[in-house]
Image (cartoon, coloured by chain):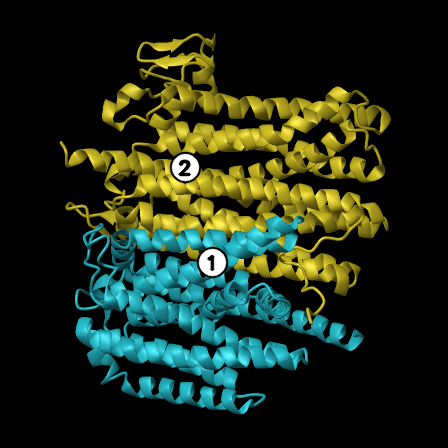
Chain colours: A yellow, B cyan
Amino acid sequence: MTDLFPFAADLGAARSQMAFTLGFHIILACLGVGLPAIILIANWIGLRRKDEVALGLAKRWSKVAAVTFVVGAITGTVLSFEMGLLWPEFMRRFGDVFGLAFALEGIFFFTEAIFIAIYIYGWKHLSGWTHFWTGVPVVIAGLGGAWSVVAANSWMNQPDGFKLASDGTVTGVSPLDAFFNGAVGYEAPHLILAAYLVTGFLVASVYAVGMLRGRRDRHHRLGLLIPLTMAVIITPIQFAVGDTAARAIAKDQPVKFAAMECVQETHTHVTEYLGGRCTSDGVKGGIGIPGLDSWLVGFSTDTKVIGLDSVPPDDRPPANTMLHWAFDAMVGICSAMILLGLWLGIAWWRKRDIPATPWFLRATAISGVAAIVALECGWIVTEVGRQPWIVYEVMRTEDAVTKADGVWISLGVVFVVYAALGAATIVVLRAMSRRWRDADDVEVPYGPRPEAPL
Amino acid sequence: MSSADAVAGVLWVGVTLYAVFGGADFGGGFWALVAGSGERGNRARALIDWAIGPVWEANHVWLIFMLVTLWTAFPEAFASVMSTLFIPLSLAALGIVLRGAGFAFQRVAARSSARRFAEWSFAVSSVLTPFFMGTVVGAVASGRVPIGNAEGDPVTSWLNPVSLLLGVLFVATGAYLAAVFLVSDARRFADPDLVGYFAVRARAAAVVAGALAVAGIFALRADARFIYDGLTSEALPLVLVSLACGAGALAFLWRGARRGARPLAVGAVVAVIWGWGVAQHPYLLPQTLTIDEGAGASETLTAVLVVFGIAVVIVLPALALLFTLDQRSLLEEEGGR
């Protein structure tokens, strides 16, 4: 028992460290995918309509992207260390099956970094449309990178591209089949759309706060409208993609689905619960809608939903109530954002303006944080919902973790350093915005080099 | 040559790029750390900051490239190294975070106290990161990483004479490369004072790095006999090339020649890295795991080679475009002054 104890304890530390660093990185990664899109939209509007305000926004956003990109590069490097530092057994057994996705991601990332530098440089040195086109590879590489890295994660949910011999040896490896696994088709679009949503609502929320403070110039209106329009158009699409993903999970990873919906026993006419506490005798509290869960899975209340009782207790995900709440929060936030979009759409249709009430700006102001909450909830559902497996029904997380001592210490250091990193990022972005208001230009990491120093 | 050997060669290209560019990058941080606070030190730091600007990001990419290639093509070695050497690799990762954040934020920090803290964080971690990476290399070279999940000693595997010596050698080599590069950069801006400043440092670093390299060979003889035997037999020509380049670079530096020192300094480092590769061949982990034994599935090795080819075709032209634009804007600025 004394031998087992530190081993079990380190699993908790390793999972916490991975969850924390990934949860941090995913926000920056989403900005890396989403910001180039809204930058190019603003740039395009600016060029087409000869609109200096739109061009000014694109220029500022590209400098914000430079800062978030740098921090994302750092936290991404840490993650590639952690693959080995925390999960050596996982990488030892399966590195050659699914590792290639990361190599592709690396190429996309490098391309994106190069072109973002060229694009920022181009504000000074390239002419209008040439400059615009140097931004296009940034958007494409962002999409490709997101797709590749999600391919690695979806492989963990729907492992493919290898065979297991009777002694557990991995044979018959096909990296291509691993890359195009059964889950990437819905997971990758879901995350890419999430990246656009998070970016759109987050940027719009910054300008909503500015407008609430009385800065109602064209700069703020456009800064709110460009990202918000993109986000509210994507929200219903994301809702449909997410709904498809949930149905696919009900089929491919029924235990994860059962944990998300607190379904204890396999049966038909399953009630859908909003909120509540998951217990072994069903959901306590919460709002129940009879038959809806079955209907959502198979468009008929007769649909059989597989429950947690289909697997032994050791094979069920932990923290059932948290999973259920995370799923509900994600769906709830997405639904609220659809309403926000309808509100904007109706006001625009009737009087070509954003809704006059400050409540609209207040709702937009919190939509940025809400989008991040939804993103993290989705990530919790995917990752915690797959437990106790690191590779679904093939390898347990406890068998993947490092036997090195000291993960608790590195976890503590990571908490402190990342808190400082996050705080510094926010402070720096706020300082940039303050200096822009004072009409200064700002030097950024990817920017063209300053005047020669000597 | 097996495809495993080819992938190992690709990995070694990554190691070389990281050692030369990343090494110079770390070395720049070293000189920023010891530049002091006087007017001359500030000018030296400004030049270092200017020189690192366009390359520091790329250096993350070489590192990630090495890690990804290692875990995809040689998963057994990756898992063994990352678990036994948990402590120095965690510290190196910490250094990378502090360094990257420090470098990024020193450009945008508004208050001078924040800027100074960012600069300090950048400079200190520029020394610690290559040191810990050197200890990792020492642990591998001296056969202290057994196969398995944290099977080696968590402390003595990297706290031993060979590892410590290689750690210091990594720092010194980076400082040497950086100083040689900075001499050229200072000359470009027609600043004879800084040319002299970095030339003195380049010569000193050359002597120190050379002395450490010689000491390293004796340490290897005592503690990593396999590598020593390789370096003194199959890899001997490369070791001699490295020596010749190093001596040549020193001679050029002494004479104050305008060109020649830079390629020779790089040549010295590249030759010793490939010499080490030849000496360690055919082992990933000397005398416990060969390249062929440690290689992943052959389909994956082929795919890695294909992806590497795609990367060369896509990334190199883009990188060339960036450097061309960077140089052009420099010319404009110089012409404008």
Mark 2–mark 1 CB contact (< 8 Å): no
Q: Is residue B162 above or below residue A137?
A: below
Left or right, residue B128 beside residue B201: left
What residue do we see at 42% from left, 51% from top?
Answer: B94
Q: In which quadrant is the N terminus of chain B drawn?
A: bottom left
From where the camera sits, is residue B141 visible?
yes
- Disc 1 designates what residue? B124
Query: In this rendering, does residue A108 appear at all?
Result: no
Query: In the picture, residue B271 is in which quadrant?
Result: bottom left
> Which amino acid lies under the numbered mark 1 shown in the image of this protein?
Val
User: How many numbered callouts?
Assistant: 2
* Viewer-closest of B301 and B225: B225
Residue in the image at 46% along x and 20% along y? A325
Q: Report the front residue among A358 and A334.
A: A358
The answer to whether dots 2 and 1 both sit on one chain is no
The picture places residue A168, in percent across and down from the top left corner, at 19, 46
Residue A300: image location, x then y, percent: 46, 17
Distance CA(mark 2)–CA(mark 1): 28 Å
Q: Please give left or right for residue B137 compared with residue A23 in the image.
A: left
Q: Between residue A187 and residue B335, name the one nearer to us.
A: B335
Residue B201, image x, y percentages: 50, 77
Label annotation for residue A131: none
Front-lying residue, A161 or A153: A153
Q: Residues within 10 Å of mark 1 (few under 14, many from 20)?
A: many
- The residue beneath circle 2 is A19
What is the chain identity of the residue bearing mark 1? Answer: B
- What is the crowding at mark 2: few (fewer than 14 residues within 10 Å), some, or many (at least 20)? some
Q: Mark 2 lies on which chain?
A: A
